[in-house]
Image (cartoon, helix red, strand yellow):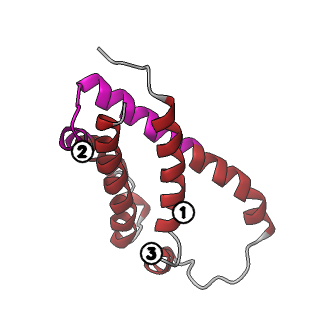
Amino acid sequence: MLQFQVSVLPLVVLTLVNFFLSWLWYSPVLFLKPWATALGTYGKKEMTEAEKKAMPFLFLSGLVASLLLAYGLQVIVHSIGATTFGAGLAVGLVAWACFALTHSLNTLFEARKPIVLVINNGLFLLTYAVYGGIVAVWR
């Protein structure tokens, strides 16, 4: 039986951590150059007006996606009954492989370079697995 009741503090903390980790992942500190180069956008100097107007929506959608990830992992991990970090990590790995990875593989027809999928799924793998472990022990 699925347990839809979640703990608020882990939900809020993991939402914010995921939002900022995602920002860091795609920043110049980590993977901006290879990711943006593969997409053909690296070195672009100015944002267009349309891109500037889209930023609030992009940030809001990123925050909502982070919230949904934190909520969904809590529901899955708690419903399965994982209570150790290792068990939660395993649940996160399975969730990543079954949902995030398969969704990414279904985007191959968009002709993105493989490095984009590797960079994106590196973040997804890290967050699903580690957050699954954290959720298992933080109730």
For the point 38% across and 32% down, the residue is 74
Magenta residue span: 64-91
Residue 77 placed where, x, y %? 30, 31
Q: Distance between the residues labelled 3 and 2?
A: 23 Å
Reply yes or no: does residue 31 show up in magenta: no
Say whether disc 2 or disc 1 marks the residue closer to the N-terminus: 1
Q: Distance between the residues labelled 3 and 1?
A: 10 Å
Say whether disc 3 or disc 1 marks the residue closer to the N-terminus: 1
**Residue marked by disc 1:** 23
The amino acid on which the numbered mark 1 sits, given as a three-letter code, is: Trp
The local crowd at label 1, few if under 14, some if 14 to 19, many if 20 or more residues have their Cα within 10 Å, is: some
Q: Which quarter of the rendering shows the C terminus?
A: top left
Residue 1 is left or right of residue 22, and the answer is left
Task: Tell me the SS state at disc 2.
Answer: helix
Q: Is the magenta stretch mostly helix, strand or loop?
A: helix
Task: Tell me the SS state at disc 3.
Answer: loop
**Residue marked by disc 2:** 89
Task: Tell me the SS state at disc 1.
Answer: helix
The amino acid on which the numbered mark 3 sits, given as a three-letter code, is: Leu
Q: Between residues 45 and 131, which one lies in front from this camera angle? A: 131
**Residue marked by disc 3:** 30
Residue 27 is left or right of residue 127, and the answer is right
Q: Distance between the residues labelled 2 and 1?
A: 23 Å
